Amino acid sequence: MAAFLLLGPAFVYRGRFWKGSGDELIAVGGVLALASAAMYVLNTFSMDAVFVPTSVPVTASALAIVVIGLNEWLRSRLRALRHTRGGISKRALIIGAGSHGLTAYRLITDDPHSEHVAVGFLDDDPSKRYLRIQGARLLGELSDLPRVLEEKPVDVVIIAIRGLPPEQLDVIVETTKQAGAEVRVLPELDVYDLRERGASAGSAIATRPASFRPIEIDDLIGRSPISTDVQGIAGYLDGKTILVTGAGGSIGSHLCKQLARFSPGRVVMTDRDESGLHTTQLVLEGSAMLTSDDLVLGDLRDSGFVRSLVADVKPDIIFHAAALKHLTFLERFPDEAIMTNVGASMSLLDAAVETGVPQFVHISTDKAADPTSVLGGSKYLTERSIAAVAGDTGLSYMSVRFGNVLGSRGSVLGTFVAQAQAGGPVTVTAPGVKRFFMSADEACELVLQAGAIGHPGETLVLDMGEPVRIEDLARRVIALSGRDDVEICYTGLREGEKLEETRLSASETDVRPNHPLISQVSVPPVDLARVRGLIVSARISGHRRNQELVDAMRRIVSAGSDRAISSSMQNGKVGQRSTSEPLSTAPVSIAAILDEAGEKGSAS
């Protein structure tokens, strides 16, 4: 008693240790050891008789540790029982007993709000068969989930396994739904990732420790994200002046947020969408006064604006994310695709060369591989134009090609979520359609990595794993919506759409010299004079000569390449052209368009 009265307040009970923790128990053991030593010393120097029996210090110390530990265990069990019976805490079953599972358990036990109480774990690792953590034990494998949910009262199932395959996720969601429980996911613990997820995901994460997030669209893909050379990225961006086009869009805005991690000297953001720029600044800075010189409102299709912008900013690096990307719209309005995706890119390239910008990274799409659509053709034409400029100048100009980005505006997943919430139907193109998907973080890190490892004129392509069946994705979204009345409706392939996208064209070689998940493809340069003529034709003809524009673009894209563009792009109808109307075989004549305009002017 004397030892605890003297040493306890000094070494144990001063708020140094988390209550009931192993550190506290070790400190208590130290005090007991000192008390035992003091009793042995008193026995040694006692003159008349033994001060205490020699067995007392050892027995009393061991018994004290047992009693203190049992007291803490009983208190925690009684607190958990009181909270669960009182409806304060939810009984949680943790999927995964590895490092992430233990992290989830600590988040639960350390939560001062006692939002959850752990009832046990599930894990397929046979070495954890007899695992027990402070009273919560391993209850079986993942396949035992139905049995466990039937035997034990569980309010929420917490997934604490990174990269869980989507098939297993489907089973967990369906089984949990049938048992009337919720599904939650261990949140990202990195501060940056937590902030980013809270800013960009559909459901915000509470910042208190024991808050677990719902399943989000990123989880439906079930693939491990790419890892990039962060040090290499930081090296070439540090202190540089960077221009980001399309900064108000999904990729551009996320790219600006990623750039902030690498200490650039200045990031200038431009877009013609004022609302998009407002949102980007609001996310980056917490306010959006729109008075910063780093926000530039303008249209990249205006070559004068582009030239003055690049001359004023004098960027070291340009990330070109501005583009039109809706396939069906561009099939109907190919002139808009050419003027924006090709024309604005050429204006930006010309201005970059004039100003001597050392690096230029163009964001392309997987639809540029063996293109069958106007969107794919326009982006592949831009890739080849960049290769031509890089070949003529030797400057480090390149493209980055990737698939659908989760959470971006117009993404199929966002459409599915909106349709399911509205009660359906969820529209799927066709049962066999497959697409590549990646997260916005992956897409932007790939863009940044490209500047570090890419060579002039190359197109860098991410290994995005196996393509995902769109129908499976739709069914997962419907399952997560909690609605049983939502149906799937097949609309059929639209003009220019492929049944399955590819990363590389038939003539491209998969070479990965610098990163195991990034292919560096050599793209053949294109005749820039013909590209400029096509751009002028699109600006003059407008919607009147859609098919001639597409035919001309097809010929330019395929010229000098090892392959011909597939028959879908060669023979597919565009816009409102009748199927009986013959395809134009002559290239678009600028002079003819000018003459036609002059004749109409004279007649009027």
Image (cartoon, rainbow, N blue to C red):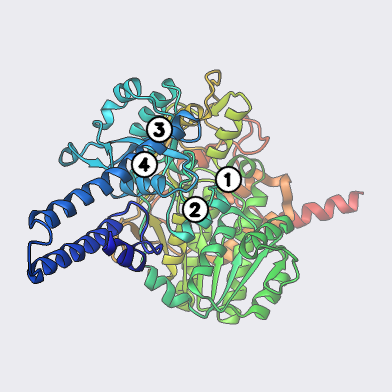
Where residue 331 sits: x, y (%)?
Answer: 61, 42
Task: Please tell me in which quadrant of the rendered image residue 342 appears.
Answer: bottom right
| Mark toward the start of the polypeptide (3 vs 1) | 3
Circle 3 residues within 10 Å: few <14, some 14–19, many ≥20:
some
- Between residues 283 and 234, which one lies in front from this camera angle? 283
Q: Residue at x 69, y 69 (%)?
A: 295
Quarter in which the N terminus is drawn = bottom left
Labels 2 and 3: the sequence-earlier one? 3
Label pair 4/1, CB-CB below 8 angstroms: no
Q: Is residue 117 above or below residue 543?
A: above
Answer yes or no: do the residues labelled 3 and 1 have beta carbons within 8 Å? no
Q: Secondary structure at mark 3?
A: helix
Is residue 489 or residue 595 the one in the foreground?
489
Residue ID for mark 3:
81
Question: How far apart are the alpha carbons under marks 1 and 2?
Answer: 41 Å
SS at mark 2 in the image: helix
Q: Position of residue 558 (x, y in %)?
A: 47, 53
Task: Give me the disc on residue 585.
Answer: 1
Which numbered disc flags the more N-terminal residue, 4 or 2?
4
Q: Position of residue 180 (x, y in %)?
A: 45, 23
Disc 4 marks which amino acid? Ser
As measured in the structure, the alpha-carbon distance from the residue carrying label 4 to the one carrying label 2 is: 42 Å
Residue denoted by label 2: 440
